Image: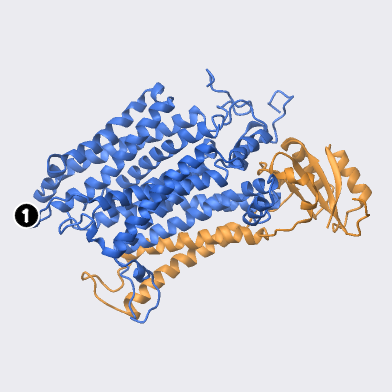
Amino acid sequence: MAAFDELDPLTGRKVLVENFQTFHEVTETVAAPIEIPSGRWWAFFLASLMLLGLLGVSLGWLFWEGIGIWGLNNPVDWGWAIVNFVFWVGIGHAGTLISAVLFLFRQKWRTSINRAAEAMTIFAVICALLFPTVHAGRPWVLYWALPIPNQMGMWPNFRSPLLWDVFAVSTYFTVSLMFWYVGLIPDLATMRDRAKTKARRIAYGIFSLGWRGSTRHWQHYEKAYLILAGLATPLVLSVHTIVSFDFAVSQLPGWHTTIFPPYFVAGAIFSGFGMVLTLMIPLRVWFKLENFITIKHLENMAKIILVTGTMVGYAYGMEFFIAWYSGNAYESFAFANRAFGDYWWAYWTMISCNVISPQLFWFKAVRRSPLALFIISIFVNIGMWFERFVITVTSLHHDFLPSSWDYYSPTLWDVTTLLGSFGLFFTLFCLFCRYLPVIAIAEVKSVMPQADPHYDPKGDHHG
Amino acid sequence: MAKPSKKKVFGLLAEYETPREIFAACEKVRDAGYQKWDSYTPFPVHNLDKAMGLKPSMLGWLVFVCGISGASGGMLLQWWTSTIEYPIIIAAKPYFSYQAFVPVTFELGILLASFAAVFGMLAFNRLPQWYHSCFNSERFARVTDDKFFICIESTDPKYSPEKTRSLLEGTGAAHIEEVED
């Protein structure tokens, strides 16, 4: 790490790619690791594959026996499945924030991390979609949620937030996938043009669609990219808003609050950046990408975690204030029960991980230490899972009627399904790291100083 | 290349080293009045489309129309299914409870607009197109790495093998070659 951050000669800002790389070196650094198989990759891939196998076993038993194998009981009829669903959807949001929102704000540092973050989004949404699908009990009739004419002459209930979710999350998945693929096209062409084997050339060739870097193409391409960023920005805000409606539109104390949409969106971005750091910190070392994903990039992400973590902390406080200030006995009870009831341990785990741990990011030394960032990012992941657990379970287990109160605990199969979903996520992420450029090569080149047509290596850079 | 090729010439391909060079070269080719030509770069060079004299992309209009169609189609679908096709009272709400129909309307608007952006971009660019004459040049493989190219096509009315070549030479091209169709 340089003692001072290098500055761009034209803009005077910090350079985004350190140690003055040529365009060719950029291509080499990003493309080389995915052309050589590595032992470390196999170790991770096989471990992920084993967890994926665990998911297969858990789901097989689930389909055979039914959702009775989970710890659900009468007041708590939404358990880990919904907790995991919200957790995984939330993770995805950071990828879209990086790819779309930071693009609209012209945050050029995003180019080093957007490809992997978008991949994370897609894989996280796949994991998320799994849970409502299997929780429905009869996944083979899931198409009933879609407005398809059928022999029953029935239509979905468009007034239900759960149906809004179907539309929101499936749209989110489709748009994220298209956005990611559009970004990949020029880089797939790079992989095609440097392929050493015929199989690689054909495979990358098919998916790069014959891209040849034509300026006439770049023109429409850049327009499409800008429009997709503009569409994905309100979309990502709508998705977690609608996910929060699953709770907020119900009448249950602790769920029925108007703060839920912004609070869920902030939490989603918070958790997603936690996962981005968890993935990127090892990746940048193992793939030797330190010149691209610099300490400054990590520091920027730490700042976003600090901001969103503080917003989440504010939301936790405001929920309590409104519960007291509303004078509503049920509401007050729900919140007192959340912090001091049966699930006090889950609540305080959540507070420690989500509110207290990110406050360490006020210190620059912590923000610039990959080890500290990695550890805190794990805390953020844990804390945000617990947030969804606290919201779901504490409101349900003590509902309006004390005679139906019950304590909820997960079974072994709940645990294996969650672990298995991590297997699915990491298997997909390993495959991504193995076959696709983890950094957007063309985009990174375009933000380097020498990409500017005004850049003159011999001149005084003021021409 | 032992046998002389009988194939038609597609055009002249000139290679440049930096964005600065290709930017100046594009301005010269544009000012010389060529129409059927293109430049090829590893990444979008800022304002190179203007240096080439290209008109702005019309993709935004297509996306706008599709987005509006998606949103209005979504609202129409919900209105028709809940008031005409299968009216049923849910939670004492009116048949046409449009407030509750906003999320699905919004999502369908976004979905169709995004389809238009992606597939419209591919259609405007005539992609996928797995064969292109430029791929016949060995050197052109570096267009996705670190080299910059201009290709003036032989179908351009102003094209002449000598004059076009001397124009490209005058732009400081590092290498010039004829590519086959």
The chain letter under disc 1 is: A
Q: Residue at x 14, y 47 (%)?
A: A334
Residue behind mark 1 = A402
Q: Is residue B67 left or right of residue B102?
A: right
Tell me if residue A95 can be seen.
no
Residue A403 location, quadrant: bottom left
Q: Residue at x 12, y 39 (%)?
A: A340
Q: 10 Å neighbourhood of mark 1: few (<14), some, or many (≥20)?
A: few
Residue A58 image offset from top left, x and y in percent: 32, 55
Residue B89 image offset from top left, x and y in percent: 24, 75
Marker count (numbered): 1
Residue B73 image offset from top left, x and y in percent: 44, 70
Q: Dividing the image into 4 quarters, which one contains the C terminus of chain A? A: top right
Query: Is residue B155 positioned above or below B29 on the image?
Result: below
Chain with orange colouring: B
Q: Is residue A414 left or right of residue A402?
A: right
Q: Residue furthest top?
A: A3
Q: Residue at x 85, y 57 (%)?
A: B156
Chain with blue colouring: A
> What secondary structure is marked by label 1?
helix
Residue A237 image offset from top left, x and y in percent: 39, 50
Tell me if residue B111 can be seen.
yes
Report the colour scheme. by chain
